[in-house]
Amino acid sequence: MRLSRYFMPVLKETPSEAQIASHRLMLRAGLIRQASAGIYSWLPMGYKVLRRLEQIVHEEQQKANHHPMLMPTIQSADLWRESGRYDDYGQEMLRITDRHDRDMLYGPTNEELITDIFRREVGSYKQLPLTLYHIQWKFRDEIRPRFGVMRGREFLMKDGYNFDLTKEDALHAYNRHMVTYLKTYERMGLQAIPMRADGGPIGGDYTHEFLVLADTGESEVFYDSAVTDLTLGDRVVDYDSVAECQAIMEEFTTPYARTDETHDEAIFAEVPEERRRSARGIEVGQIFYFGTKYSDALNATVQTPDGTNVPVHMGSHGIGVSRLVGALIEANHDENGIIWPEGVAPFPVAIVNLKQGGADTDRVCDELYGALTAAGLDPLYDDREERAGAKFATMDLIGCPWRITVGPRGLKEGKVELTSRRTGESEEMSPEAAIARLKELLANR
Amino acid sequence: MRLSRYFMPVLKETPSEAQIASHRLMLRAGLIRQASAGIYSWLPMGYKVLRRLEQIVHEEQQKANHHPMLMPTIQSADLWRESGRYDDYGQEMLRITDRHDRDMLYGPTNEELITDIFRREVGSYKQLPLTLYHIQWKFRDEIRPRFGVMRGREFLMKDGYNFDLTKEDALHAYNRHMVTYLKTYERMGLQAIPMRADGGPIGGDYTHEFLVLADTGESEVFYDSAVTDLTLGDRVVDYDSVAECQAIMEEFTTPYARTDETHDEAIFAEVPEERRRSARGIEVGQIFYFGTKYSDALNATVQTPDGTNVPVHMGSHGIGVSRLVGALIEANHDENGIIWPEGVAPFPVAIVNLKQGGADTDRVCDELYGALTAAGLDPLYDDREERAGAKFATMDLIGCPWRITVGPRGLKEGKVELTSRRTGESEEMSPEAAIARLKELLANR
């Protein structure tokens, strides 16, 4: 993308309404603008990040044979009355009356609707196991929305639902979801620690939250530092293998890691003192197994091999997609701006022309732009007529992982400069070498 | 995808509530289920089609340097009061009161919100031209929703907005949108004819609707049959070229083509009689140039080169993405089911195993499935234990363009059967030849 043709309204001043870094930086870098309290428009570069996160979520879910679908935002109140949750939700639920005076609502979650689809369409154990998910906008009418997309009212969430014949099968689905989530966050360049959590209004005895450590996190967390050494890395997981998913679940949940809601000082005291940590965390996902809570309430049964009808075992599993953009920035920024992990950067590489209008600099920039575009590396080319300082400040603010600087002085020796946003380290090399290096650096993107 | 693991609940009976073919077939093929009146859940296969349409829209918009973004579904009423449209919209607008008693609404369109973003962020002619678009769910509280996704209440629309310094520039944006829309529909396998239309509540002197001819269309249309001979084909368009976009606009709008709202018998009479047609059409898109209607109301100005401030010239441009799924089926079906055009089929090829559990048939099907998957052709493999007749009926219903049938009789001679859903013609060949043929047939997908 040529910046001269893009819509990326960056701000020099820090917006006074923003209290935390991600909110400030999302406004300053032109990722979002507030439409009304707790409701945001995603400008082109913000939308690009959001889509990229969506894409990663889709890919990892589908590897586990979870099927994407899409439920609507507006639901009838009837199903929520049937489950008994219409009153439970209180004022956080956005309630709507349509022109025929029917009670509707903007879905904050979808257990009822998906269970209704299931009970109407599935009757036999032969159609199990089944996991359906969607990525859809939700609404929670927060009394005091704040922190930008971290606690907004309209937010994008992936929510998935597993349907299984037995508790044992459903716990495999639970473990499978845990593994897909760990993979998902790792691909985004985030460490999200699964922590034993509280069921809350969804319910469920088995539930883990995934927390990203950050000073601005809303939760206090306690953990064994051994948990932060764990990664899945390049492991290829067979999601049909009960043993493999369970082993990974155990690997990641054996070290102590809990939020303040479930924290137990006595157990924590058994962790060797030098490994005991307390910190703050941002919740970016949660998984639940809640058994037959909704299938009992909504009468969602399947026939077993011996012909009896039993309520289906269920779980639900969520990733806060729009909130993740904020969490990513909280975990990846410095005083100059965002430092995108390579897997989620809106543009992995920026080209900065220090002499716009110069025959040589323009030519080399155009060549770099063409070659990087052809290689699928989606460069952002700062082709504005601005002084170098302003261009560098903008690039630091928006946080592309790599920057190629093209100036007349370097070009005299046939060199451009390749700079890492994260380390700040620069290296001079020929344009061809820079292209080759970037292809290598971004091969896994 | 292996059908035994997929969620594709097909119906044998025709649902009584569905009055038109697309609604019937979308329910029968398991693409959608009604969640409440005029509101649908998109099941996995329906969602796959929807995503594919979205993808085509995105690609064609971005070729013209139109920038994707995303505005929220819930808007404040304030901007609509400022433009004067809060009252105009009447009961079709879904009005909502939040917990703080603020008037909100579920956006039926976004002229106000995008103009507000523009006026806050853009101040100079130097930042023009600019076209922003999004693909987002909208809500219109239809008094009598019907025809499935063709006249639903919650629907997915692409809406784009151009901002230009002058009327002349804005008319180039108008023409550019017309060309991108023609390209978009062609890639979907649809002929959508641009017809001179009426401004309606959006306003505007320049407006064309795009109509797909179908007996169940809601509009009566009148046209010169010469217009149906026009195609863009493989033409590569330079969207920066004013002349080229204008020439294509003139090519496609010179033959008479109007809806009943703008039909003029006197002009129509000048069309040679043998080319005069009247038919019914489904509206799948509309483009508008409305000048400074919203920029005047919302005070969205830009500074010109000579330093004066002028209201920006605007247009808005919509494609009914969810409705297109219905329109595609109306235009592509027979008594047995859907006949997807190759560009939009959820699965371009199906593999039917006539003897599930047979060593040879299973092996060949697995090989075909592996090879087609590796080639990116996304096959659907009917690996259910069902009799041949039931498998063929399901495949005809869901309408994959190509079917490979693998049976023990053919395999004795090393042959499988390749069948076109559209023509019904079959040809026997080796599995390798079938793979090679499909790669060729689906090369442009």
Image: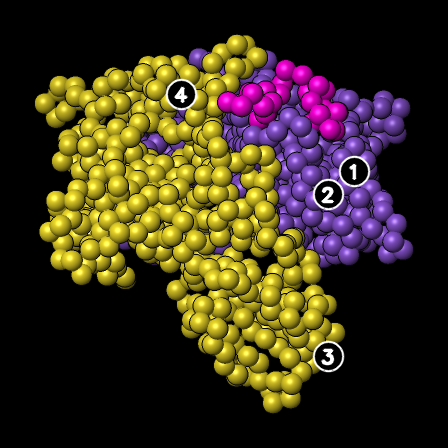
Chain colours: A purple, B yellow
Q: Are marks 4 and 2 on the same chain?
A: no
Q: Amino acid at mark 1?
A: Asn
Instruction: Give the spatial CA distance, label 4 vs label 3.
Output: 65 Å
Residue at 62% from the left image edge and 21% from the top image edge: A93
Q: Amino acid at mark 2?
A: Arg
Is B391 one of the magenta-colored residues?
no
Q: Quadrant of residue A396?
A: top left
Q: Which dot marks residue B90?
A: 4
Q: Give the residue at mark 2.
A: A119
Residue at 85% from the left image edge and 22% from the top image edge: A265
For disc 3, the chain is B
Q: Give the residue at mark 3.
A: B359
Within 10 angstroms of label 4, few (less than 14), some, or many (20 or more) residues? few
For disc 4, the chain is B
Residue B362 visible to an observer of this rendering: yes
- In the rendered image of this protein, does residue B244 appear above or below residue B152? below
> Are the residues at dot 2 and dot 1 in contact (C-beta closer than 8 Å)?
yes
Q: Give the residue at mark 1.
A: A299
Nearer the observer, B63 or B188? B188
Side of A130 relative to B289 (left or right):
right
The label nearer to you, 4 versus 2, is: 4
What percent of the width, then of the height, locates residue A400?
43, 39
Q: Are marks 2 and 3 on the same chain?
A: no
Q: Amino acid at mark 3?
A: Ala
